[in-house]
Image (cartoon, grey):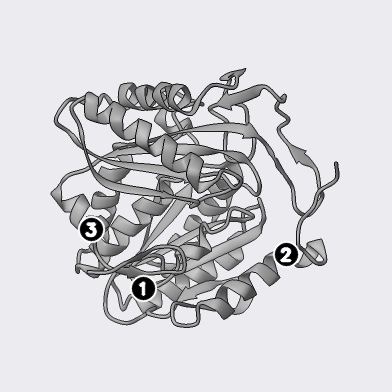
Amino acid sequence: MGMKKFINDPKDLTKELLEGLALSNPSRLTLAENKLVVSTNLGDKKRVHIVSLGGTGHEPAISGFVGPGLLDISVPGDIFAAPGPPVCIEALKMANEASQGAGVLFVVLNHAGDMMTANMTMEMAEDMGLNVKKIVTQEDISNAPRDNWDDRRGLVGCVPLSKIAAAAALDGKSLDEVYDVAMKFNKDMATLAVALRGATHPQTGDVISVLGEDEMEIGMGQHGEGGGGRSKVKTADETTEIMTNALIKDLSIKSGEKLMLIINGSGATTGMEMLICFRKAYKVLEAHGNEVVASWVDEILTVQETAGFQLFIAKMDEELLNYWNAPCDTPYLRVTK
């Protein structure tokens, strides 16, 4: 069966989806030149600003989390593709100037294209004397062990990390302090994904990762990369228990620790399914002696119509929890006092 989507000319996808985002959220963000998505509170006061980059096709991430209290600028690439260094350096210059000397935290997911762009951008930023620190999110436990952390892929963790970093910035912390808060969260977060069905590329119709009718894969990456965990389809409880226990082991979670628990739908998983899976993960953690102090169940970082979800756990302390609960107003995450 061919691809069925409500689109126009495939080459206009990125431009049109960003226009729709801006037109539907005028109080939160604007669309600037070169497709930069900019928060309406950019430059509101002297503070660290938060910038991130990434391909489109993963909506609402990452541009849907631009707005007061979260990302200041998103640098979108084309569908499933990183933007180029020139537009990233433009965003860093804009954010650095808006920060009034406080500096910029540059949040980058660990994927080959994003990292290549980010590393080239950081070299240019250093040559220009911009005050920027880069932080890389890499929490997918399926493709590398914890002692080889630098090889892990970035998944949904980039969003809560950016939220916490932005709140620390609004609290008046310096760039080094914002980086340290974000890195504390970064080091103690982990994600594992599962898929029942892969996606299609919306510009070409190409199928990304084919799974049999009775197959699922635990550990599938953001773009259909294999995770080595193919099996017959299991129930929600069986699947979630396997995944939760794998995350408990990876993070060396001890009884009594306070945790953030997120279920991120990958694009075609219903709210019903996500809530059933969250319920099981919560009960596994409760039985392990842990308290879930922060939670989120939604589509956050998707891959078109991939059927599946990402299970995310992070260790929390009072500082991180306060920053997570701080107000923000973005298209797809709003926190009020």
The residue where tag 3 is placed is: 323
The label number, if any, that marks residue 210 in the structure image? none
The kind of residue on which mark 3 rests is: Tyr
Q: Earlier in the sequence, mark 2 or mark 3?
A: 2
Disc 3, SS: helix
Res. 68 mark: 1
Which image quarter holds the N terminus? Answer: top right
Instruction: Decide which of 125, 282 is in the foreground and name it.
Output: 282
Depicted 80 relative to depicted 307: above or below: below
**Amino acid at dot 2:** Leu
Look at the picture and state if 192 lies above or below 19. Answer: above
Distance from Cα at disc 2 to Cα at disc 1: 26 Å
- Amino acid on which disc 1 is placed: Pro
Could you tell which of marks 2 and 1 lies nearer the N-terminus? 2
| Displayed quadrant of residue 249 | top left
Q: Residue at x 29, y 56 (%)?
A: 164
Q: How crowded is mark 2: few (under 14 residues within 10 Å), some or many (20 or more)?
A: some
Image position, residue 181 (x, y; %): 24, 51
Label 2: element kind: helix
Percent from the top left, x then y, of residue 134? 40, 53
Q: Name the residue under label 2.
A: 13
Query: Looking at the picture, how far across and down is residue 53, in whole percent?
Result: 52, 58
Q: Contact, CB < 8 Å: mark 2 with mark 3?
A: no
Residue 256 appears in the rendering: yes
Q: How crowded is mark 1: few (under 14 residues within 10 Å), some or many (20 or more)?
A: many
